[in-house]
Image (tube, grey):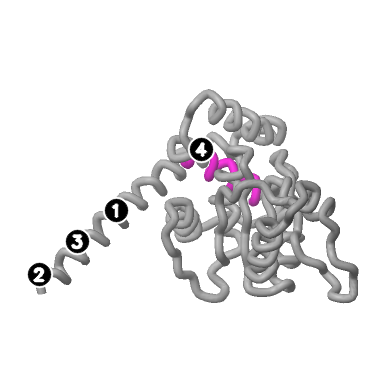
Amino acid sequence: MARNQNILSFNYFRLQKVRRRLKQVNRWQKKMRDCSDTELQQQTKDYQARIQAGESLDDLLPEAFATMREAAYRILGMFAYDEQILGGIVMHQGQVAEMLTGEGKTLTALFPLYLHALSGKGAILVTANEYLAVRDGKEMSPVFRWLGLTTAIGVKEDSKEPDFTAVQKKNIYSADVVYTTYSTLGFDYLIENLASEQEDQYMRPLNFCHHR
């Protein structure tokens, strides 16, 4: 009984910390709404400069999430609910956020992907199949591009298309945000580590990977 109480207390404490982060994000909402398009787009460069100066992603999270929230609203017509922001915070922390079908997993993923892509080290979203990778990549790429980040889809849209060359793979993994599948990422990582020639290698060190 005591052990269960300890677990409940720990989970409650952890949830309260996440909710405090949500309040911080919400406090930036009006400021981001009042920004012009140019001012909102400029935020990405400002965040990148602050990271270079030593500021942590945790410190940037409230502003960066609020920026993405407003950008997604302007470009995609989607305004993230608090529950989706909570999910993004949890994923940034490396924890599991369970969301049911229809609760907006694709939109939720924008937030940790954007935050981690600001580091310049790349962020990857991994899905179960090619259809989801292509669909999500196409739907979400406009907002990333609008904010000044590059995106790529790491799988073929048509199975009849020829396999990607090493040069094409290198261009894909050089993007700020990559949408791909479990199997593709796993095989690419295996091939990368078995390659005997540098020109056959195309991945950069893995930084942040979100499983959808």
209 relative to 170 in the view: left or right? left
Looking at the image, is mark 4 or mark 1 earlier in the sequence?
1
> Amino acid type of disc 4?
Glu
Residue at 49% from the left image edge and 27% from the top image edge? 54
- Residues 201 and 15: in front is 201
> Amino acid type of disc 3?
Ser
Mark carried by residue 16 = 1
Q: Nearer the viewer, mark 3 or mark 2?
A: 2
Residue at 60% from the left image edge and 39% from the top image edge? 118
Mark carried by residue 139 = none
Mark carried by residue 63 = 4
* Residue 154 in view: yes
Q: Label 3, on which residue?
A: 9
Question: In the image, is residue 169 part of the stretch drawn in magenta?
Answer: no
Q: Farthest residue toward the front?
A: 196
Secondary structure type for disc 4: helix
Secondary structure type for disc 3: helix
- Disc 4 to disc 2, how far (Cα)? 39 Å
Region rendered in magenta: 61-72
> Amino acid type of disc 2?
Ala
Secondary structure type for disc 1: helix
Please say if the residues under marks 3 and 1 sit with CB atoms less than 8 Å apart: no
Looking at the image, is mark 4 or mark 2 earlier in the sequence?
2
Looking at the image, is mark 4 or mark 3 earlier in the sequence?
3
